[in-house]
Amino acid sequence: RIGTAALAVQVVGSNWPKPHYTLLVTGLCRFQILQLLKEKPYPVAEVEQLDRLEQFTNQHKSEEELGELSEQFYKYAVQLVEMLDMSVPAVAKLRRLLDNLPREALPDILTSIIRTSNQEKLQILDAVRLEERFKVTIPLLVRQIEGLKLLQKTRKPKQDDDKRVVSIRPNRRSNHIPSTTEDEEEEEDHDDVVMLEKKIRTSSMSEQALKVCLKEIKRLKKMPQSMPEYALTRNYLELMVELPWNKSTKDRLEIRAARIVLDNDHYAMEKLKKRVLEYLAVRQLKNNLKGPILCFVGPPGVGKTSVGRSIAKTLGREFHRIALGGVCDQSDIRGHRRTYVGSMPGRIINGLKTVGVNNPVFLLDEVDKLAKSLQGDPAAALLEVLDPEQNHSFTDHYLNVAFDLSQVLFIATANTTATIPPALLDRMEVIQVPGYTQEEKIEIAHRHLIPKQLEQHGLTPQQIQIPQVTTLDIITRYTREAGVRSLDRKLGAICRAVAVKVAEGQHKEAKPDRAEVGEEDFLLLDCKEHVTEDAKSESISDTADLALPPEMPILIDFHALKDILGPPMYEMEVSERLNQPGVAIGLAWTPLGGEIMFVEASRMDGEGQLTLTGQLGDVMKESAHLAISWLRSNAKRYQLTNASGSFDLLDNTDIHLHFPAGAVTKDGPSAGVTIVTCLASLFSGRLVCSDVAMTGEITLRGLVLPVGGIKDKVLAAHRAGLKRIIIPQRNEKDLEEIPMNVRQDLTFVMASCLDGVLNAAFDGGFAVKPTVERLNSKL
Ligand code: ADP
């Protein structure tokens, strides 16, 4: 229970990369613990001071022996100090101290100078009696002197700057001194650095990289470990060693096999698969990777990412996904310079380190969601990555040496091309991936999604059965999306609910319990509830042979759906909303797929103003003005009048046009025909047919111009249960993309001018009235 009292003089260190502190203290005296007062949060004890210098100097008892010992000690100490380089000021000062200090203080001071293990140091601190202290320290001094002599002998030819070595490492093996953990750690670290150097030399990195690494390792060797830069440099070197400079997987490209993999993994999406196969075929023939970067553009959940994964699978390459959504700092792509604390390589280099080969498939997900910020433009950084002419010497800021990316196969995905910077778009070949039809979704669900969900939930087809009508119900009543992601989630919810029932059933099977009988009628089907009740009363009164688990397979019908997923979220509301004049259905394209959009109009007394609501962009506002102008100029032809019977539609009248879903910004010219139809209905007082949807841009002279996104729009109309679609004449060619079964369900009206649109939109047509001059009585 002996300790040393000391005064903390200096604390240096940091918490990063790992807590590492150096404490400099001045020892005051030894003490003994008399009583421990408390232990937490730090020990507090009553202590007694043990060594007081005066006390020892006043002691006469063993003075003679001590004198001899101290004389001997002094001699060794002088010998040791004189072996050191006296030109170093600290050594000269030490020499002076030897003479000036009381001899009793010397053992403590010299122990702190010579090389000793921690255990030996503790032994000396423990030695309270002066005599003992001298006795313990002398062998250490002698050992140090011998060590120095040896060192000087072996390094004679070199200049005697070795003398500066104040302490040398004791040769543990020859002296049989037990090693301490601290020493071990140091040695380990040293070994690590040597290993690292070996790894660097044997790695296949480029010449330039090798040069940089060797320079860094030289610096590392000289650096004290407590320096934060030590960890930085080491991390850097470790990354350099780990990077796959020359490691690659062998491509196994066989187009027939690729076709099978793509077909097996994905249903439908023929156009995309065809283009991907072409791309792969060219690469097989040319064996050269230079070519455009594929970019899949389409709504979420249509399988863009998973096609990317399949491509990697067909090529036998590693796959890595880099999510770029929301990335607004160019260092995310290119890395931080190493001068930063916490600097790291960019995502490309990190990805390479993760996959461990230099020819993976990198999927750059959501390139349309890159954002600019004060930290630079990440899209600009991507330019270099994606350009086959430049990317063989891609330089990450962190690495600071070029890395060859030309073997990497990049594939990008996006929801829309509108927000991809033009320069980036220019380097990519865009492949549109439109949404799915209901029939395709049903097939995808039954071929891919349901089996996957069953497996994830530990269910077998013998336990659950989801008929196609149920899938259709989920698709039409519980989801409204272009892709299949939310359908997948709903199927997941069903599987979870069934898993509970199955697990409960197994439990009951194990322990048949009469009281629970009857509950086995799974999923509380609304319409069957009374049957369940009957069964219950019967079974309880009857024998226990009805105590069976739920009937397998559990059939999911509409009632079960309602039970699990709640009441349907979407109903066919279309016809209800079209029972007043002044409403028409338009078709809109959004990054999330096509959508139907109700356009509403109303008029009121006023001064001829037009109010537009529903977050519209400039182009859409212009369409509204165009539509009104056209109708005003054609009011007589169509016998359209305002409330007071005047052909000047805006005379004493205000018009309000509203595009619902006001939270979403809408823009684009394709609502033109819808606005015209809606206003024509308002001014004529006639209802627009409730099963008609339309899209098309208008001109001031009443022509209908083609628009984009026809497939998505038509699919949306089909999803919503509409029957007739008015599209611009010049979009007729786009109908080829639409699956046959959808086309069969719908009637398409091609319109080249607004007359045609109005005729198709109203029951019985919207014929131009022959302008018979009516005589107005002036009596
Ligand atoms: P995206 O990247 O387009 O948003 P994902 O690739 O993540 O969509 O696809 C979502 C899910 O839908 C995946 O589990 C995928 O397997 C499935 N999926 C999408 N399209 C198909 C398809 N045509 N055939 C089979 N599964 C599909």
Image (cartoon, rainbow, N blue to C red):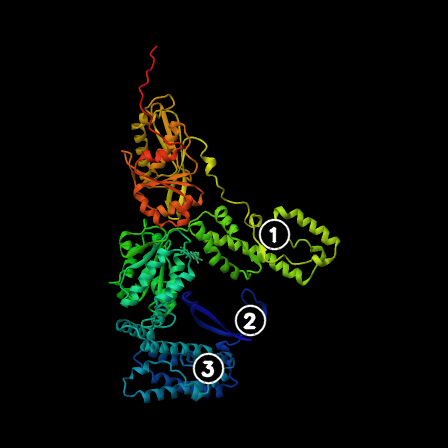
On the image, which quarter does residue 385 sit in? bottom left
State the SS at label 2: strand
Instruction: Quickly name the residue at label 1.
Output: 523
Q: Nearer the viewer, residue 760 or 125?
A: 760
Q: Residue at x 42, y 61 (%)?
A: 265
**Residue type for callout 2:** Val
Classify residue 259 by image quadrant. Answer: bottom left
The residue wearing badge 2 is 47
The answer to whether residue 44 is above or below residue 485 is below
**Amino acid carrying mark 1 in the image:** Leu
- Which residue is identified by label 3? 179
| 182 sits to left or right of 392 | right
Kind of residue sitting beneath label 3: Ser
Residue at the far left: name it. Answer: 389
Instruction: State the CA–CA distance, disc 3 to disc 2.
Output: 32 Å
From mark 3 to mark 1, how far is it between C-alphas?
70 Å
**Position of 274 relative to 690 (above/below):** below
